[in-house]
């Protein structure tokens, strides 16, 4: 009996949600707000909100305000797919942004094909996303192969001889190890072992002891910022002193500096955004105004390396809607191919990727190598 | 060889806190017959209390530690009074489910209050590690090991040398008889749960500065605590202490020489193996019959 | 007289504690034998050994010529050796009728060749009907027919004992071990129960009884065996036991120290139940 | 009442999609809820009817999902010493059957191994088993793709020889598939529980020593219960894989087991309708809570609701309500409480 009551409530609530606001353009946002990726997902959403407010302050898109429908995918692929379903069918969003992690995005992708609704992918790095023949995917973050390719010219300058990998045991980490390994081998650099660690793992001293004993000169690490902090502290603790390069663009150097202190000194990081040196970014004015707004809202500065992607994502979507001329999925999908503007980390312009006829869109952001030196972020001279 | 020595040193440092976690859990099981699924959440609470005391209140690191442990004690007492006392006499499955519910609520609660971003707790120890030949170990971790061993010793003395401990041991042997002999079993339950919780909080407060503090940190810690308790035999305090070090050793060697991906599988494999080989744990004093 | 059950020099030790030192006795086919002795004498332990709930540290038990060593309780039950329990004699959440149906478990096995499959495809109909009829008959026989649809756990103490007996009888035993069946019963209930025991024996079922109610034991038993500190101290017909000095000493001579030792032994046995 | 409620529920579930006008989001929620409810029913067989709390139940669900997905996707793995196993894709229906068999086989294995221990030990062995399986799924990348997830799993298709083959692509089709499998599982459990085997399970749960003494083989009975329970969970996992069409090692998440346990306990363990009612409530509760509160708060509510139900209706909603509806005088308290020693 209670079962049916609850069900009725659920139906009523869902119907109520559908009825709201027809004079706005709704954009679905499918991000992890709880679970393992909660922190990053929240940053991205905050960035997205800044973009939406900014666009609305300028009069919106096609004369209408944009409205973000934000849903939590709980860092769980099943939920991510369910959320996409809800956003598309119940909230009737003609376009979405999401879903942070690669496995989350991959879970959503069949839904995009099923309902033919486009999604802008802001963070995920798995190569699969843009090579599996889903024409509704448009990605602004670099897949690890692209990141490796951009990093290739720096390999010789750094004088790398042999590299070990320490990566997160998921698509993000393993994908990076494969793509960077391939690139390094082509460059004549020896590739040693690939060690993995679980997402929630806190103590990596065993892996580090193994890496310490290896004869490599460089360790390439792919993980989220919390684990990087732990790694740097634990490396210092066991006296592991090798060149460290992190990849993935989700490292958040400020948090590393704040939390790992001198243990992070000398570490190198591949990032896709340079908020510390706004004048070196492709659109310094936009960078400064974004950072200004971010600080004004009382968010931690450290979050900008995540949130700028949410900001650029919504801006790219707005451009697409503007170009489409109407807020309909098919038109927006087509219009994504015509998007061309300068984002906070380089031009946002989608190139075709994947099997012919069903290509996904992949933008090619800038990738920067930065170094943490005496508690500050600097661009190393190579 | 150097790698092996480094692994062994790591084991020692890690094992101390594992033992602390395990003892808290095994105490609660042994005396109250409650499988405490809030143990991980209390570990997290301990770490956050440490964070609050050091980072927010600006307390001295060494002063903050007892504050966090005391906080864990109060938290544990509250859980026992509010959630376990009403369920006195229920079967073990019911209390286990109550604890699961409480664990979910507590963990989500910390996420709600503190947000998902990991927090770091500054420590007063130097970054540079202590070098002993090829092996190095950080000063902070040495302190953590020392503090953990100290707390284990205090617990041991408390249980074996004090009136409260005597009452606890009596309740452990046979709650009904202890009640007949004038032991206030309800009070013992509250004290036991509070003590066990404070040990979990202490482990969190000690490891918080070593690692970082985040709402999900307790999940893995809890599972490891279970492994340790099973290893040592449910309710066996000495067993739990030794179990902590064995688990740490298995993890270190497993990750170092087998595959780091299966590092966390070591604990579970140990549980399964031990239960199949010796269901009452490795250090059970006498085999139970029937 | 042929022995249906032989306890052959059985000893049981828990750690350092001796529950049964050396027990040696035969139960004759068709008799009512009582096993008595002060608390902690090892009576329930002996029951647990005979029915496979405890493994003896030494010795062997043979039932109808088969050694019970290493057999599990359910296998022993299927050989035709049934028992009741001192403390909990029913499945408390089921109706009295369903209690007996559970007790008829072993009988159901003989009716269908693939019982599980039969249950799944719903072919158990005829066998089930037969079982139900037997359950009803059995309940009427022990005098619980009117209580059939009540929850067993909600019955009065004495009635729960009767359910326990019905359950044991449902297994169609050749021998029945009764563990303090009338403790907690009032005088009239006890009288009814004595009649029931006799009726059971008339069905050809041998009975081994553990009981503290001496008048009842004296009235119903053919033979009595007395146990003290895990040792057999006397054996014989009721009249002989009544006047046996060793028995009187055992019951009267329990000083406080002896009582404490006995209580400890009792606690150990209960741990063994867990 | 006993027969009416399930039939009424079935009838309303049959027409529900028409009322929803095929709202895909709610249908999706109902399908996932339905799949979890089948999982809950299978768990109930162990937890409710034999009294063994398995907190590793998700392992069978996940094994079913992976076996079914891999059967229909095909794989090519090296098993050491240079040998390879190459498997060409089979139709999803074959995957469904293999999932049931494989999960059942694992149930047998776990049953044989872990029923040596009871109570808290059993709980922890089952958790450990599930975690080991999860870690294997995570690390055996060549077979399972590890964290990269198995993608492109084909939708379930049902073939009738001579009549053709239907692929269930739409939500509505999947909804009715899940409803059909769920109904079958319900009937199966009902049959089983009413049989001699069901009585053996109840006997073991209520008083194990007594059950042994009337000739019930504990290990055999519990193992069979575990096999059937695991096989049902495997079926649910297969449905899940072919409906979602992507699975990753997260299907082994402990939290899903907890959800299933909550469904069973809240609904009423050891009752037929309990897991169904509990499944519907707790499956749809997150959907109902989503619009009204923050995600973290939803989980806090979830935890609190569990405790409140245990406190107010310790035997669950279904027994609690039926006692309330019957308005019978409360049964006299049992004079003789079963000794805790025996219950343990």
Image (tube, rainbow, N blue to C red):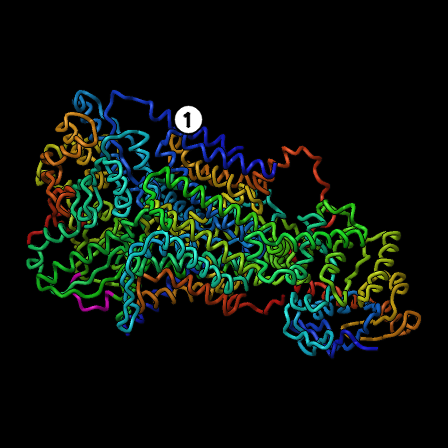
Residue at the image point whose x is 69% and y is 65% from the top? C269
Q: Position of residue A186 (x, y in %)?
A: 9, 61
Q: Relative to D24, does residue C229 appear above or below in the rendering?
A: below
Left or right position of D156 against B80: left
Residue at the image point whose x is 40% and y is 35% from the top? D287
- State which chain disc 1 sits on: A
**What quarter of the picture does the N terminus of chain D occupy?**
top right
Q: Position of residue B79 (x, y in %)?
A: 52, 44
Q: Relative to A110, does residue B286 appear above or below in the rendering?
A: below
For label 1, the crowd category at 10 Å Cα-Cα, with few meaning under 14, some 14 to 19 and many 20 or more, is few
Q: Relative to A273, does residue B161 appear above or below in the rendering?
A: below
Left or right position of C190 against C15: right
Range of residues picked out in magenta: A211-218
Of residues A93 and A374, the one nearer the viewer is: A93
Magenta span has A214? Answer: yes
Q: Is there any visible trace of residue C239 in the rendered image?
A: yes
**What quarter of the picture does the C terminus of chain D occupy?**
bottom right
Instruction: Tell me the residue that label 1 is attached to.
Output: A12
Of residues B191 and B59, the one nearer the viewer is: B191
Magenta span has A150? Answer: no
Q: Position of residue A206 (x, y in %)?
A: 31, 64
Left or right position of A184 against B204: left
Q: Quadrant of residue D135?
A: bottom left
Left or right position of B180 against B128: right
Total numbered labels placed on residues in the image = 1
Q: Quadrant of residue C66?
A: bottom right
Q: Position of residue C69 (x, y in %)?
A: 66, 75
Of residues D112 and C148, the one nearer the viewer is: C148
Secondary structure type for disc 1: helix
């Amino acid at each position: 009996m209670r079962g049916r009551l609850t069900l009725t409530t659920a139906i009523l609530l869902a119907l109520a949600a559908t009825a709201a606001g027809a004079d706005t353009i709704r954009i679905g946002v499918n991000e992890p707000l709880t679970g393992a990726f909660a922190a990053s997902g929240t940053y991205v959403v905050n960035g997205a909100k800044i973009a939406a407010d900014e666009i609305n302050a300028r009069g919106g898109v096609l004369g209408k305000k944009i409205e973000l429908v934000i849903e939590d995918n709980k860092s769980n692929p099943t939920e991510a797919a369910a959320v996409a379903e809800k956003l598309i069918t119940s909230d009737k969003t003609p376009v979405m942004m999401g879903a942070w992690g690669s496995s989350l995005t991959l879970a959503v992708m069949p839904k995009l094909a099923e309902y033919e609704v486009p999604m802008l992918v802001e963070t995920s790095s798995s190569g699969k996303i843009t090579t599996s023949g889903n024409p509704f995917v448009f990605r602004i973050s670099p897949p690890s192969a692209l990141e490796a390719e951009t990093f290739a010219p720096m390999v010789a300058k750094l004088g790398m001889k042999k590299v070990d990998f320490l990566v997160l045991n998921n698509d993000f980490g393993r994908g990076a190890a494969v793509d960077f390994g391939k690139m390094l081998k082509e460059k004549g650099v020896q590739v040693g072992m690939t060690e993995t660690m679980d997402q929630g793992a806190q103590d990596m001293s065993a892996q580090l002891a193994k890496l310490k004993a290896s004869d490599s000169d460089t360790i390439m690490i792919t993980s989220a910022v919390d684990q990087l902090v732990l790694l740097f502290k634990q490396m210092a603790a066991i006296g592991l002193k090798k060149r460290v390069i992190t990849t993935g663009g989700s490292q958040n150097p400020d948090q590393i500096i704040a939390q790992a202190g001198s243990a992070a000194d000398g570490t190198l990081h591949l990032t896709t955004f340079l908020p510390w040196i706004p004048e070196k970014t492709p659109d310094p004015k936009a960078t400064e105004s974004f950072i200004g707004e971010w600080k004004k809202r009382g968010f931690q500065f450290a979050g900008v390396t995540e949130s700028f992607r949410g900001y650029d994502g919504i801006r790219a979507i707005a451009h697409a809607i503007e170009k489409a001329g109407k807020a309909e999925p098919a038109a927006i999908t087509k219009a994504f191919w015509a998007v061309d503007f300068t984002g906070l980390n380089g031009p946002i312009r989608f190139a075709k990727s994947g099997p012919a006829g069903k290509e996904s869109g992949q933008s090619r952001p800038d990738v920067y190598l930065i170094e943490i030196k005496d508690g500050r972020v600097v661009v190393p001279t190579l | 060889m150097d790698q092996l020595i480094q692994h062994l040193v790591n084991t020692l440092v890690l094992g101390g806190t594992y033992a602390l976690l395990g003892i808290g859990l095994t105490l609660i099981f042994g005396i109250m017959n409650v499988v405490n699924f809030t143990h991980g959440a209390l570990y997290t609470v301990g770490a956050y209390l440490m964070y609050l005391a050091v980072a927010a209140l600006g307390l001295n690191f060494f002063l903050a530690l007892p504050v966090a442990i005391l906080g864990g004690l109060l938290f544990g007492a509250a859980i026992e009074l509010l959630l376990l006392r009403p369920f006195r006499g229920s079967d073990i499955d019911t209390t286990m489910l109550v604890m699961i519910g409480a664990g979910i609520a507590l963990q989500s609660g910390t996420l709600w209050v503190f947000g998902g971003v990991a927090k770091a707790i500054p420590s007063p120890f130097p970054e540079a590690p202590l070098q002993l030949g090829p092996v190095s170990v950080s000063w902070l971790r040495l302190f953590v090991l020392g503090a953990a061993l100290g707390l284990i010793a205090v617990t041991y003395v408390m249980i074996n040398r004090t009136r409260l401990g005597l009452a606890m041991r009596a309740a452990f042997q046979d709650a009904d008889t202890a009640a007949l002999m004038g032991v206030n079993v309800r009070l013992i339950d509250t004290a036991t749960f509070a003590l066990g919780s404070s040990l979990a909080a202490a482990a969190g407060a000690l490891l918080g500065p070593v690692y970082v503090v985040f709402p999900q940190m307790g999940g893995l810690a809890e599972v490891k605590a279970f492994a340790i308790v099973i290893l040592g035999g449910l309710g066996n305090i000495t067993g739990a202490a030794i179990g902590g070090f064995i688990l740490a050793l298995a993890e270190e060697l497993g990750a170092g020489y087998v595959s780091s991906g299966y590092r966390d599988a070591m604990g579970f494999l140990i549980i399964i193996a031990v239960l199949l080989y010796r269901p009452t744990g490795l250090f059970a004093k006498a085999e139970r019959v029937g | 007289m042929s022995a249906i059950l032989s306890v052959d020099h059985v000893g049981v030790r828990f750690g350092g504690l001796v529950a049964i030192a050396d027990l040696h006795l035969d139960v004759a086919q068709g008799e009512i034998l009582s096993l008595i002795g002060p608390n902690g004498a090892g009576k329930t332990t002996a029951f647990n050994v005979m029915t496979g709930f405890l493994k003896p540290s030494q010795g062997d038990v043979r039932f109808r010529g088969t050694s019970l060593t290493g057999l599990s309780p359910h296998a022993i039950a299927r050989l035709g050796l049934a028992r009741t329990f001192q403390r909990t004699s029913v499945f408390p959440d089921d109706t009295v009728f369903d209690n007996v149906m559970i007790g008829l478990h072993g009988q159901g096995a003989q009716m269908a060749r693939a019982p599980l499959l039969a249950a799944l495809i719903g072919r158990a109909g005829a066998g089930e009907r037969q079982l139900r009829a037997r359950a009803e008959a059995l309940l009427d026989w022990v005098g619980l027919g009117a209580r059939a649809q009540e929850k067993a756990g909600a019955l009065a103490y004495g009635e729960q004992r009767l359910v326990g007996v019905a359950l044991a009888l449902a297994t169609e035993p050749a021998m029945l071990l009764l563990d303090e069946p009338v403790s907690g019963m009032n005088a009239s209930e006890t009288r009814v129960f004595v009649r029931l025991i006799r009726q059971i024996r008339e069905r050809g079922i041998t009975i081994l009884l553990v009981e503290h109610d001496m008048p009842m034991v004296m009235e119903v038993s053919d033979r009595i065996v007395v146990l003290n500190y895990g040792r057999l101290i006397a054996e014989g017909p009721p009249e002989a036991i009544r006047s046996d000095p060793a028995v009187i000493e055992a019951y009267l001579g329990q000083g406080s120290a002896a009582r404490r030792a006995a209580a400890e032994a009792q606690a150990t046995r209960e741990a063994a139940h867990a | 009442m006993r027969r009416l409620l399930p039939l009424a529920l079935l009838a309303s579930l049959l027409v529900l999609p028409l009322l929803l006008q095929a709202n895909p989001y709610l249908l999706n929620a109902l399908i996932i809820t339905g799949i979890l409810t089948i999982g809950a029913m299978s768990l109930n067989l162990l937890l409710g009817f034999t009294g063994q709390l398995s907190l590793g139940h998700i392992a069978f669900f996940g094994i079913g999902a992976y076996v079914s997905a891999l059967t229909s996707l095909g794989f090519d793995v090296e098993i050491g010493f240079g040998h390879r196993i190459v498997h060409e894709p089979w139709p999803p229906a074959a995957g469904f059957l293999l999932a049931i068999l494989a999960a059942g086989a694992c149930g047998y294995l776990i049953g044989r191994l872990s029923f040596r221990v009871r109570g808290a030990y059993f709980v922890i062995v089952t958790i450990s088993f599930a975690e080991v399986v999860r870690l294997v799924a995570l690390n055996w990348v060549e077979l399972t793709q590890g964290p990269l997830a198995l993608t492109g799993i084909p939708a379930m298709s049902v073939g009738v020889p001579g009549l053709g083959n239907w692929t269930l692509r739409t939500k509505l089709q999947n909804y009715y598939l899940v409803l059909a499998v769920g109904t079958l599982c319900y009937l199966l459990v009902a049959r089983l529980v009413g049989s001699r085997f069901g009585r053996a399970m109840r006997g073991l749960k209520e008083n194990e020593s007594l059950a042994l003494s009337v000739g019930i083989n504990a290990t055999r009975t519990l193992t069979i219960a575990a096999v059937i329970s695991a096989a049902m969970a495997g079926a649910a996992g297969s449905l899940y894989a072919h409906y979602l069409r992507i699975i990753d090692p997260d299907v082994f998440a402990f939290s899903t087991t907890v959800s299933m346990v909550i469904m069973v306990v809240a609904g009423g363990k050891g009752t037929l309708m309990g897991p169904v009612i509990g499944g519907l409530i707790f499956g749809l509760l997150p959907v109902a809570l989503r619009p009204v509160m923050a995600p973290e708060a939803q989980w806090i509510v979830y935890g609190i609701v569990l405790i409140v139900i245990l406190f107010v209706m310790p035997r669950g909603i279904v027994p609690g309500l039926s006692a309330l509806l019957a308005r019978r005088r409360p049964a006299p308290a049992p004079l003789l409480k079963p000794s805790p020693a025996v219950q343990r």
